[in-house]
Structures are given as C-alpha cells and as structure tokens.
C-alpha cells in the first residue's frame, strides 16, 4: 500500500460526510420552510460540484498533510483540519440561505449557522497548537478559507446594500492581495508556509464580528441610533481592513526581496 493512500481515503471520507451533512441540513430547511423542489435540486448540484472541486484540490496536496516541524505524515485527517473543512464545506449553504432569507424567515437560523461557521476559525488553529498537530495543509486551508467565506458573504452584503462599495472593495483587495502574493512566492520558492500577522488575523475576526452583528441586528427590532452605530462600525472595521492590506503588502515586499537574493 502506498504511504499516501490512507490520507487520501480519509480526505474522501471526510469531505463525503461533510457534503452529506450539508445536504441533510438544507433538506431540513426545505421541508421546514416549504422550499420549491428546484431550489433543493439547485443546492444539491451546486454543493456536489463545489465539494468535488475541494476533494480534487485536497487530493493533489496529500503531501502537505504532515505535522510541522517534523514532517510526520498524517494517516487520517485530524480534528483541527476537519474544523477548517467544515468552514469550507458550509459555503454553499451560507450562500443559499443568504439569498433565501429575503423571501423566507430564515434570518435567525442563518445567524446561528454563520456564528457556528465563524467559530470554527477560532477553534481550528488553537486546537492544532494545543494538540501539537499543526499541519502544512491546515495553514493553507485556514488562510484561504477565511477570505473565501468573507468574500462570498461580502458579495451578498453588497447586493443587499448592507455594506458600502468601498468596504466591499477593501475586502476583495485584501483577499486577492493574499492569493496573488502567495501564488507568486510559492512559484519562486516552492512550498511557502502561510504567515498570518496579528493585524491580518484581527482584521478577519473584526469583519466576522461585524457580519454576525449585522445579521443579529436584522433579526431584532431596530432603534433610532442603530443606523449611526452601523456606520461607525463599518468605518472602523473597514479602516482596519485597509491597514491590514498595507501590512500584507509590506510583508510580500520583504519576502520578494528575500526570494530575489536566493
């Protein structure tokens, strides 16, 4: 048996289970709120293709399922990576629920679901460090899943007028800065361990809190000062995201110089 076969089977089994959980969850929503069959079939097709792409990408990175710094390969997906995979797996469900909440009373359920998804971001990294099972693939998935989730939710927030265009642009610039910068450095230096600064991680957390707060405020009765609070929070979090863009550009500038000297 080849050494990579156990982890490949574990990846396939884990992602299949997460796909099934998302489908069962959405089926429950469909029954509870009387969604049309075509909506359920649309979700099923979208989730199937999306999870298939995730499986394909992860199977191409089986060599990165190893514990740092010793490089001990994993035989099965560990719990920290499963939490990150849950965040990635939940993306189609979040998208469909955001769209459907305009015509169905899904907001309280959507709020609870989004908070659970955001909590996985707090738990996966801490768990991997506590159990001494920090993996290469975990660092990569954690970095990309954060911004993938935020960018998708930001699209919906912009469409519904919940955030201004400049805030939406800042989120996308931050995400693409990381993706393009990491791609260039990886091409120059091979595998690159993602490094997240305090500013970067804090900005992601701030946006997640802002979005959770927005869902919560939508679910509750509004007050006269709610709109003013919204503007202040969006401006403050948006400014923090802009600062994190500058921080990430400086990081890539330093790493590019280091790569050029080698």
Image (cartoon, helix red, strand yellow):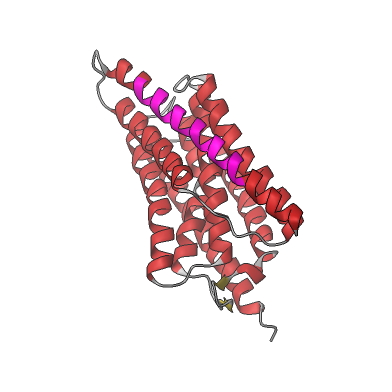
Residue 34 in view in this figure: yes
Q: Position of residue 176 (x, y in %)?
A: 63, 38
Q: Is 214 situated above or below 129?
A: above
Q: Is 34 situated above or below 67?
A: above
Q: Is 197 situated above or below 37?
A: below
Q: Of all residues shown, which one is farthest toward the front?
A: 261
The magenta span reads 232-251
The residue lying at 45 percent from left, 27 percent from top is 239
Is 233 within the magenta? yes
Residue 30 in view in this figure: no
Is 236 within the magenta? yes
Q: Position of residue 203 (x, y in %)?
A: 44, 39
Q: Of all residues shown, which one is farthest toward the top?
A: 224
The residue lying at 43 percent from left, 66 percent from top is 128
The residue lying at 53 percent from left, 40 percent from top is 247
Work out whether residue 149 or residue 56 is closer to the camera in this orientation and state it.
149
The residue lying at 73 percent from left, 59 percent from top is 189
Image quadrant in which the N terminus is located: bottom right
Q: Is residue 221 left or right of residue 118?
A: left
Image quadrant in which the C terminus is located: bottom right
Q: Is 196 situated above or below 167?
A: below
Q: Position of residue 36 (x, y in %)?
A: 51, 35
Q: Is residue 191 left or right of residue 95?
A: right
Q: Is residue 105 left or right of residue 200?
A: left
Q: Of all residues shown, which one is farthest toward the bottom?
A: 1
Q: Main secondary structure of the magenta part?
A: helix
Q: Position of residue 11 (x, y in %)?
A: 58, 67
Q: How many numbered marks appear?
A: 0
């Amino acid at each position: 048996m080849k050494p990579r076969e156990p982890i490949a089977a574990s990846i396939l089994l884990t992602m299949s289970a997460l796909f099934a959980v998302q489908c069962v969850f959405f089926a429950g929503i469909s029954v509870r709120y009387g969604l049309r069959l075509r909506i359920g079939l649309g979700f099923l097709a979208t989730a199937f293709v999306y999870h298939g792409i995730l499986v394909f990408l992860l199977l191409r990175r089986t060599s990165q399922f190893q514990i740092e710094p010793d490089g001990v390969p994993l035989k099965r997906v560990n719990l920290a990576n499963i939490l990150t995979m849950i965040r990635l797996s939940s993306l189609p469900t979040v998208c469909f629920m955001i769209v459907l909440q305009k015509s169905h009373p899904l907001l309280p359920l959507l709020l609870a679901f989004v908070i659970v998804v955001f909590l996985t971001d707090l738990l996966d990294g801490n768990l991997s460090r506590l159990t001494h099972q920090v993996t290469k693939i975990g660092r990569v998935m954690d970095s990309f899943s954060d911004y993938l989730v935020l960018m998708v939710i930001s699209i919906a927030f912009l469409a519904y007028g919940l955030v201004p265009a400049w805030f939406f642009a800042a989120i996308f610039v931050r995400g693409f800065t990381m993706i393009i910068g990491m791609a260039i450095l990886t091409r120059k230096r091979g595998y690159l361990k993602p490094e997240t600064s305090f500013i970067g991680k804090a900005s992601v957390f701030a946006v997640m809190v802002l979005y959770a707060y927005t869902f919560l405020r939508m679910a509750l009765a509004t007050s006269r000062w709610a709109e003013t609070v919204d503007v202040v929070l969006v401006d403050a979090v948006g400014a923090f995201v802009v600062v994190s863009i500058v921080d990430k550009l400086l990081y890539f500038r330093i790493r590019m110089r280091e790569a050029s000297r080698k």
